């Protein structure tokens, strides 16, 4: 499946129609990776478009190319046409096609002539693509996108727009170069991106210092009023209802990163954020050290992810989900206290 020559022929040969897709609720890594590949394909002269299952978060709107992203749920006809007529579909930052959501998955699967290229760093990659670059040790998909482009076309063509997109993907998926997935290679690539003109302080500011006053107040409220600590299990839960979110004029992306805050408490090993949005109960899990939150997400909440960062959807309501977690915690008491 990993036939580089075939991919090179596809990308360096005749000009193609190409779509780049990533998972639902796209994050910094999926948008960074997608736009990086988009800039690369434009350099090669292909006709390329980025299509996301739903809208990309506003905190990334300064990235070159952001305004041309087509959200499948909002601009459905154009997105569907684009996917239907693609020769190649890049599938970035997900390990199984269901991560794009049912509607978009059907459209992708209906295009049987498209060559599917998957670049990703999640565990247990599915065998859906025709070509797969999967490395579960990579800090981010953006890091792999850099290596993918470098392998095929070297580094000379790399421009600032590409570098900014890759840097943003790495920065957001490594929690600013602090998660254990950060390697020497991650820093080497970051150094190359800085040589290409990336200004780390500027990107950091654009990504992290872009809160609205409401978002900061929601963070304060969540930590003050909604944080529940379970010292026996070294765990923390923040549960936010739709009403809580509305009170602070919730905008897409406003809860991004919130799940990490409880981990700054020395004794907390696992942090869980539960949010109620559009009647759906979305869950985010984070952990320190060897504690595997992706197992809990997969076993109980229709989800999955990485060892230290996972997500899922709950079949229960907000209160029941908290109760369910409280029931589950004793099963993990030993591991949480290891
Ligand atoms: P987040 O908490 O930022 O939404 O997600 C953290 C990580 O968990 C993501 O990078 C992704 O790997 C994984 N993840 C989030 N939601 C889901 C889901 O619904 N299913 C699966 N399999 N993984 C998810
Ligand atoms: Mn990622």
Image (spheres, rainbow, N blue to C red):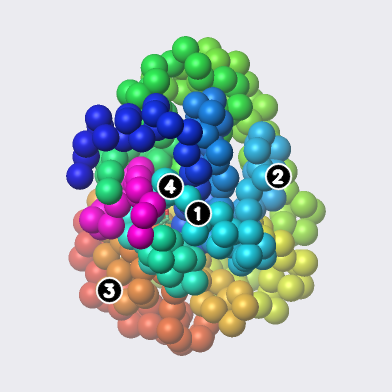
> Is residue 121 found inside the magenta-colored segment of the image?
yes
**Residue 195 percent location from the top left of the image:** 53, 12
**In what element is the residue under mark 4?**
loop
Q: Earlier in the sequence, mark 2 or mark 1?
A: 2
Quadrant where the N terminus is found in the figure: top left
Queried on whether the Cβ of the residue with tag 3 lies below 8 angstroms from ligand 1, the answer reads no
Other-residue count near label 3 (Cα within 10 Å), few / some / many at <14 / 14–19 / ≥20 = few
Report, in whole angstroms, how far the alpha carbon at label 2 lies from the one at label 4.
23 Å
Query: Residue at 63% of width from left, 65% of height from top?
Result: 77
Q: Nearer the viewer, mark 1 or mark 3?
A: 1
Span shown in magenta: 112-129
> Is residue 201 found inside the magenta-colored segment of the image?
no
**Residue 132 percent location from the top left of the image:** 28, 44
Other-residue count near label 2 (Cα within 10 Å), few / some / many at <14 / 14–19 / ≥20 = few
Queried on whether the Cβ of the residue with tag 1 lies below 8 angstroms from ligand 2, the answer reads no
Relative to 63, 129 lies left or right:
left
**In what element is the residue under mark 1?**
loop
Q: Nearer the viewer, mark 4 or mark 3?
A: 4
Queried on whether the Cβ of the residue with tag 4 lies below 8 angstroms from ligand 2, the answer reads no
**In what element is the residue under mark 3?**
helix
Foreground: 14 or 334?
Answer: 14
Residue 85, disc: 1
Foreground: 106 or 24?
Answer: 106
Query: Residue at 51% of width from left, 19% of height from top?
Result: 158
Tags 2 and 1 in contact by the CB under 8 Å rule?
A: no
Query: Residue at 69% of width from left, 50% of height from top?
Result: 58
Report, in whole angstroms, how far the alpha carbon at label 1 lies from the one at label 4.
7 Å
The residue tagged 3 is 299
Tags 1 and 3 in contact by the CB under 8 Å rule?
A: no
């Amino acid at each position: 499946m990993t036939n580089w020559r075939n991919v090179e022929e596809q990308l360096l040969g005749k000009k193609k129609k190409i779509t780049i897709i990533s998972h639902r609720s796209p994050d910094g890594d999926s948008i960074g990776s997608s736009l990086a590949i988009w800039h690369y394909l434009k350099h090669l002269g292909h006709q390329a478009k980025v299509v996301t299952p739903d809208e990309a978060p506003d905190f990334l709107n300064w990235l070159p190319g952001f305004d041309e992203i087509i959200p499948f749920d909002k601009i459905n006809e154009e997105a569907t046409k684009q996917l239907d007529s693609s020769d190649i579909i890049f599938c970035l930052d997900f390990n199984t096609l269901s991560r794009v959501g049912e509607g978009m998955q059907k459209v992708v699967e209906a295009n049987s002539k498209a060559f599917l290229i998957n670049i990703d760093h999640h565990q247990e990659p599915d065998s859906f693509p025709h070509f797969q670059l999967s490395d579960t040790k990579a800090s981010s998909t953006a890091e792999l996108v850099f290596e993918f482009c470098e392998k095929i076309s070297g580094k000379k063509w790399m421009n600032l727009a590409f570098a900014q997109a890759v840097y943003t993907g790495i920065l957001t998926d490594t929690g600013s170069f602090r998660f254990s997935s950060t390697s020497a290679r991650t820093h080497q690539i970051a150094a190359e991106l800085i040589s290409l003109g990336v200004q780390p302080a500027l990107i950091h500011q654009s990504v992290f210092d872009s809160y609205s006053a409401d978002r900061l107040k929601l963070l304060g409220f969540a930590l003050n009023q909604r944080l529940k600590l379970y010292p026996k299990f070294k765990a923390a839960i923040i549960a936010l209802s739709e009403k809580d979110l509305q009170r602070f004029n919730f905008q897409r992306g406003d809860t991004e990163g919130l799940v990490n805050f409880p981990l700054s408490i020395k004794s907390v090993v696992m942090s869980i954020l539960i949010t109620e949005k559009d009647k759906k109960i979305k869950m985010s899990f984070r952990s320190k050290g060897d504690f595997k939150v992706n197992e809990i997400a997969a076993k109980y909440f229709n989800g999955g992810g990485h060892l230290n960062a996972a997500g899922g959807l709950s079949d229960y309501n907000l209160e029941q989900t908290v109760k369910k977690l409280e029931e589950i915690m004793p099963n993990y008491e030993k591991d949480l206290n290891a």
